[in-house]
Amino acid sequence: MVYLTGDKHNEFTRLSNKYFKKYDLEIGESDYIIVCGDLGLCWSKDKTFEWNCKWFAEKPYTLLWVQGNHENYDMIDEYPIEKWHGGKVRHIVRDKVILLERGQIFNIEGKTFFTFGGASSHDTQGGILDRTSCEFEFMVQRARSLYLPYRIIGESWWSQELPSEEEMQEGLLNLQKTDYKVDYVITHCCATELQNKIMSYVDGNSKPDILTDYLQELESKLEYKHWYFGHYHHDFNVDENHTLLYKKIISLDEQLPEYGRVPIIGMPKFKRNDMVVFKFRDDEKCGMIQIVDAYGTFEQDDEPSYDICVEEENCLYKHIRETDIVRKAC
């Protein structure tokens, strides 16, 4: 079976057997997990990288991924390009962690996947800095004093985060061979119009660029079942054909709630002193919210949670997930 998930940023707890058991995910030897960019494994060839590679080598599943904007592209380029399931790949861990290159079409379990990774970094308000510049130290201090995120060329930012003209042309040529028909599309960012829609929903500063415009061109030509992408750090269906992924792991064709019906971490729908009806085990209870944990708790950080007092029981129910709140009480 094929599963999909979003950005990992070199934190792989959600790809562990312990996590799978917690959420009743039965992922085994014949299964694939596709990460929609920003895997973060290739960042620095240090002991952490070596440990993570050994860790993945022992996993039963095969991890597939497309490039994000937070990858060390110079390090990735050290791995040779090979052919796998019909497209170009790089084996980071032989047969276990495989990069799906841009503009390729893969046949996996009888289904076709078009892949095109990459995105513009949107955490560069403090600048994209050159360590060789005489102004480097000044620019770093300025960014830090203003609490602005910054990136350093060749250390935390690489120009290859956006595709070359050759990669974009290769994608078009490969799609022409299939008459622009594939089953699924896997990218990191999404097309310009869809990105604008997402930015109207969530707090973000992503702007159109050469890649989102390229994906917009593909939107007008492609015939596909579903498009999966990451980058924007939320989990929801944007519409019936597009799913934004971050922390969730879903199976192919599994649907997430649309925006507005899905809990957003950091954006609780309820506030202190709200009277709510909530589910607890097999029962419904009514109480007043005493504490709001906008970013969840140590037990879960997928959604906001609440401590709710049920006065008639003189009991405080702690860490109630937002998805377990049925409605506001009158």
Image: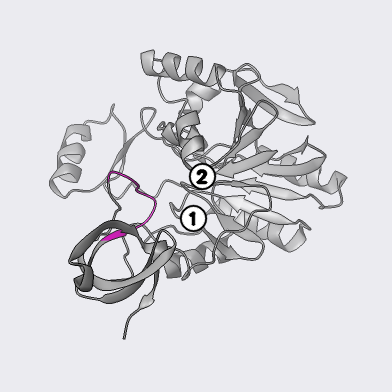
Q: Is residue 79 magenta?
A: no
Task: Tell me if residue 212 comes above or below residue 3 in the rendering.
Answer: below
Q: Residue at x 67, y 32 (%)?
A: 31
Q: CA distance from mark 2 to mark 1?
A: 8 Å
Mark 2, secondary structure of its residue:
loop
Mark 1, secondary structure of its residue:
loop
Stretch of the chain drawn in magenta: 298-306
* Label 2–label 1 contact, CB within 8 A: yes
The residue that mark 1 highlights is 235
Task: Tell me if residue 299 comes above or below residue 72 in the rendering.
Answer: below
Question: Percent from the top left, x then y, of residue 110?
Answer: 82, 39
Mark toward the start of the polypeptide (2 vs 1): 2
Q: Residue at x 63, y 23 (%)?
A: 90
Q: Residue at x 67, y 48 (%)?
A: 252
* Pointer 1 local density, CA inside 10 Å: few below 14, some 14–19, many at least 20: many
Q: What type is the residue that disc 2 sits on?
A: Gly
Question: Percent from the top left, x then y, of residue 196?
Answer: 50, 66
Q: Is 195 positioned to the left or the right of 101 in the image?
A: left
